[in-house]
Amino acid sequence: MFGYVRPNKDELLVKEYEQYKAVYCQLCRVLGRDYGWPCRFFLSYDSTFYAMLALAVTNEGLSPCRERCACNPLKRCRYLEGDGEAYDKAAALTILLAYAKAEDDIADESPLKTLGKRLLRPYLKRKARWARVRYPYLAACTESFMAAQKEAEESGASLDPCAEPTAQLLSKVFGDIAGEDPKKAEPLKQFGYYLGRWVYLMDAADDLPEDLRTGSFNPFINRLDLWGKASLTEDERKRADEFCNAALNRTAAQMALPLNLLDLGPFTPILENVVHKGLPELQREILFLHIKEKPRRELKNL
Amino acid sequence: MTDPYKVLGVTPAASDEDIKEAYRSLAKKYHPDQYADSPLKELADEKMKEINEAYDTITAQRKAGGTGARAGGYSAYNPVGGGGSSAFRDVRSLIMSGRIADAEQLLNGVPGERRNAEWYFLKGSVLYRRGWLEEAKDHFSQACRMDPGNGEYSAALNQAMNQGSGMYGGYSPNMTTGGCNSCDMCSSLLCADCCCECMGGDLIPCC
């Protein structure tokens, strides 16, 4: 996915931050163990969130440990091991989504820009096949997501139908966490639906200036009547940002309800932080501070 | 039955006040009104029932302590009511029973010239329940344009606009983070004093 689903670090307690990092590092380790060392680079905030949600919902037995970090042998890291499938599923999903994204980029962008991804493609494809053997349901979800996304964008659909494939993807993979228990599966599906929708809208809003410049497809262009404009005036940009923000807020408002109904045990504060503070913070950074357009030097003062 | 203290997330040693506090915050979390439009309504109702029972059990056990029973049960309300003279009564009852796809099919079968304000409102409600929040908002505002006086339609549009403002999650650029500082307090007190004085009273006698 896109690395949007992450906690607001400033608002975490130190112990919560340590716990988050321990899950992150453990997922990195599982990726290395199951798919080979280079696959650690596909580790993302999104899959860490998924792993943590799965650990919380299935109430896995946890055992913390400390070991040397694989990437930096001088550092000792905390790891949080689980006794269920949470990490394995999250690792499979990481690989499958990395593969889906690479394929999507290769199809969309210029051949020169995607040279690296083209070289990587056979490797990723092989890894994705492994993941499919282990978790056929997750693979089926990502495959139908890719097909549906392509169809929606090619037909030039409006905002809501374009967001549907991502929303459905997360709805299905989150629902899968709960297994057979409908009391958990229903809220998880709802939560996943709106989180996926939020991620898609955030990504589209984030790409808007770039897509305008290159003339690529973006659902917000249609919606805001920005056809044929290569760049936006300050007023237009402000209007677009506020429109995107309102759409994101409407989606975020729907996430709290299903999340309330889930029993997340010791992970409650971190997962709530992600939803109630991490996502809004990202809206602020991208839509109001435009951090991606500023030189690194300026970012330090924010 | 599960331990009522565990349901409320308190220890048996907790004071009556703490228990009331825990009950209130949970009741707010699961309040049926929030879930009125959500397919998770039943689950939320169940949770609500659970904490109500837990609270009642604890208060009954502690009756000697003299804590009052909770003030009234929470009742759910559903914005899409079964309007008596409605032209789309069948659609409304489908929406209320959660059969969204059937309701949408019926609505889509209505020819263009019969699509009045109510049609746009109901179509918006269907879209809202499906998670297509932007198109839902557009339909609600179309309904309001066609029938500006209708409270039901404007309530739906208001809700969509409020959710867009960041009141219920997400980011609001105009939100002040500081809350209320002592400077605000003083100036508010002075304002209150002025108001009192012009009505003949006095809040701060020295000024």
Image (spheres, coloured by chain):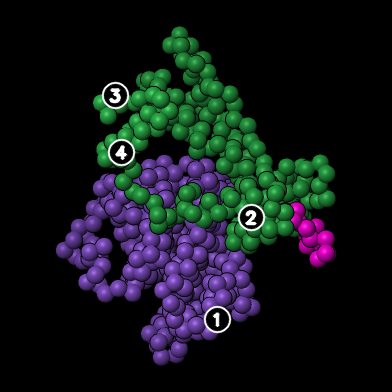
Chain colours: A purple, B green
- Distance from disc 3 to disc 1, alpha carbons, whole Å, reads 65 Å
What amino acid is labelled 2 in the image?
Answer: Tyr
> Considering the numbered disc 1 on the image, is that residue within a helix, a strand or a loop?
loop
- Asked if badge 3 and badge 4 are on a common chain, one would say yes
Magenta region: which residues? B105-122
- Distance from disc 2 to disc 1, alpha carbons, whole Å, reads 28 Å
What amino acid is labelled 3 in the image?
Answer: Pro
N-terminal label among 4 and 2: 2
- Numbered label attached to residue B205: 3
- Asked if badge 4 and badge 2 are on a common chain, one would say yes
- Asked if badge 2 and badge 1 are on a common chain, one would say no
- Numbered label attached to residue B128: 2
- Distance from disc 2 to disc 3, alpha carbons, whole Å, reads 55 Å
- Numbered label attached to residue A227: 1
Residue under the point 28% across and 52% down: A10
The answer to whether residue A232 is seen in the rendering is: yes
| Position of residue A51 measured from the top left corner of the image (x, y, whole percent) | 42, 56
Q: Residues within 10 Å of mark 3 (few under 14, many from 20)?
A: few
Q: Nearer the viewer, residue B41 or A91?
A: B41
The answer to whether residue A176 is seen in the rendering is: no
> Considering the numbered disc 3 on the image, is that residue within a helix, a strand or a loop?
loop
